[in-house]
Image (cartoon, rainbow, N blue to C red):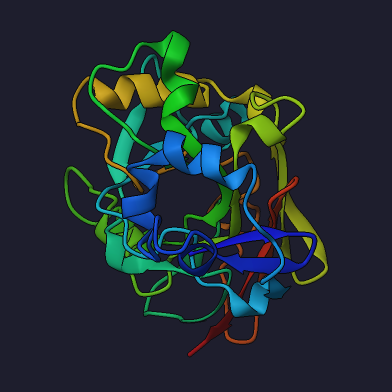
Amino acid sequence: MVLVRDGLALDVADASAGRFSCDVVATLARWDQFRTWERSAPWSGAAPVSADDLGPPVPAPRQVFAVALNYRPHADEAGFEPPEQPLVFTKFPSCITGPRAQVRLPAGRVDWEVEVVAVIGQGGRDIPREVAWDAVAGITAGQDISERVLQVAGTPSQFSLGKSHAGFGPIGPVAVSPDEFPDRDDIGFECRLGQQTVQSGRTADMIFGIDHLVAWLSTVCELLPGDLVFTGTPAGVGNRRNPPVFLKHGDVLMSTVELVGGIEQRFTH
């Protein structure tokens, strides 16, 4: 686990003399203590770093939640009424990968969905909405890459397998503490396919904000340190274009979140 600042990375285990380990989940479980230490961490041992050097901010989350139809324009393009409560599915943790990834295209129709991803800190159950942001350790960029044929196969259809192929959950390049944002409820993000901007949005336009989602999820599941919440995608996905557009061999997908930075996937057969 490293802290990243101004192009430098600080090894947390070394800098804290073992007080905090390289285990991200273990550190997130002690998030308040870690933040207190981090404010005065010694940066003399930091080394240059780039996104190419980094893995996923949480390499092995225990739970990965995702939210469908959380932006009205996306609900409209998909032909659905905006939901009255969050529509939740999962991406299986084995799909999680880092900010720079080569993704093999499975058979079918593979699509993009840029998302702002919340990283849970100490977590808990039945978290009141008014303190739900306190359960969020960081914000990162993500892609809910989706194979649309398997996603809608069956009656009723189920999403999780079609969204969980290897490399279908890239996140990164870093997780930024919510208090670093000018307005944690209004975070800008976008997605480019090659040179074309295909999606852009702001979290202020969510139907259910991040605090609402965290509180809602915690009424059913205990939120654990390192859990990820993919919070929804805006309009502009490939399968709702006319004609539809799907990812193909050689495509490069770049997704950015303000303050967080960008993730990039290259697709191959």
Residue in the picture at 29% in, 68% down: 94
Quarter-wise, where is residue 73 in the image? top right
Q: Residue furthest right?
A: 195
Relative height, residue 202 to residue 111 (above, below): above
Q: Residue furthest front?
A: 17
Q: Is residue 73 left or right of residue 20?
A: right
Quick one: 172 or 88, which is closer to the camera?
172
Residue in the picture at 29% in, 60% down: 93
Quick one: 49 or 154, which is closer to the camera?
49
- Residue 59 coordinates in the image, percent (x, y): 39, 65
Quarter-wise, where is residue 191 in the image? bottom right
Quick one: 128 or 158, which is closer to the camera?
128
Quick one: 47 or 126, which is closer to the camera?
47
- Residue 33 coordinates in the image, percent (x, y): 44, 38
Q: Is residue 141 visible?
A: yes
Relative height, residue 45 to residue 103 (above, below): above
- Residue 222 coordinates in the image, percent (x, y): 20, 31
Residue in the picture at 70% in, 35% down: 180
- Residue 227 coordinates in the image, percent (x, y): 34, 45
Number of marks in the rendered image: 0
Q: Is residue 252 left or right of residue 90?
A: right
Q: Is residue 65 left or right of residue 207?
A: left
Q: Is residue 116 visible?
A: no
Residue in the picture at 32% in, 32% down: 123
Relative height, residue 98 to residue 255 (above, below): below
